[in-house]
Image (cartoon, rainbow, N blue to C red):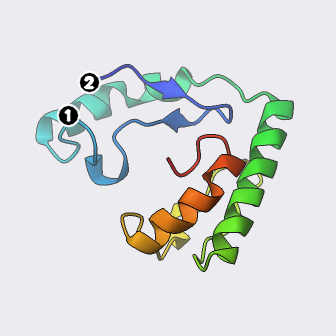
Amino acid sequence: MDDPRFGLDGELVGGLGKDGEGSKVDAKSEAYSAANELCGDLLTASKAPPDPEQLAERTEAQLAWAACMRQQGIELPDPNPDGSFPSYEWKIDLKGEAYAGANEVCRGLAGGIGK
């Protein structure tokens, strides 16, 4: 497993992704579950507190990206006040052509979101 990386908001960047997609780790395996049970608190404890100014800038950029995506026809919620997106509300196909086309237009607005 790769070392974790954290974003400006203190949240894990990359990682396993949704349901372990894009990872060499089988997040559904018994071995992973057992290791996470033993070590998961260490990851939480290692998070750096977010820099308020950087978090505000990131959230502003995320708001611009979400607005742009909506202008392109993608129904995307605004980010939460902490800068995270409510992913459970995304009812879009992140691998579809519509998302890819909209993101091509908008991705420069949010510095790293939607890559």
* Quadrant containing the N terminus in the rendered view: top left
The image shows a total of numbered marks equal to: 2
Observer-nearest of 32 and 90: 90
Look at the numbered disc 2 and give the secondary structure of its residue. loop
Observer-nearest of 18 and 66: 66
Q: Is residue 5 left or right of residue 52?
A: left
Q: Residue 5 appears at what percent x and percent y? A: 49, 25
User: Residue drawn 26% across and 38% down?
Assistant: 23
Amino acid carrying label 2: it is Met
Q: Residue 89 appears at what percent x and percent y? A: 54, 72
Q: Which residue is mark 1?
A: 24
Q: Is residue 85 above or below residue 113?
A: below
Image quadrant assignment for residue 22: top left
Q: Which residue is mark 2?
A: 1
**Sequence-first tag of 2 and 1:** 2
Observer-nearest of 115 and 85: 115
Q: Is residue 81 left or right of residue 102?
A: right
Look at the numbered disc 1 and give the secondary structure of its residue. loop
Q: Is residue 89 above or below residue 81?
A: below
Question: Disc 2 vs disc 1: Cβ atoms closer than 8 Å?
Answer: yes
Q: Is residue 80 visible?
A: no
Q: Residue 65 appears at what percent x and percent y? A: 69, 58
User: Residue drawn 73% across and 30% down?
Assistant: 50
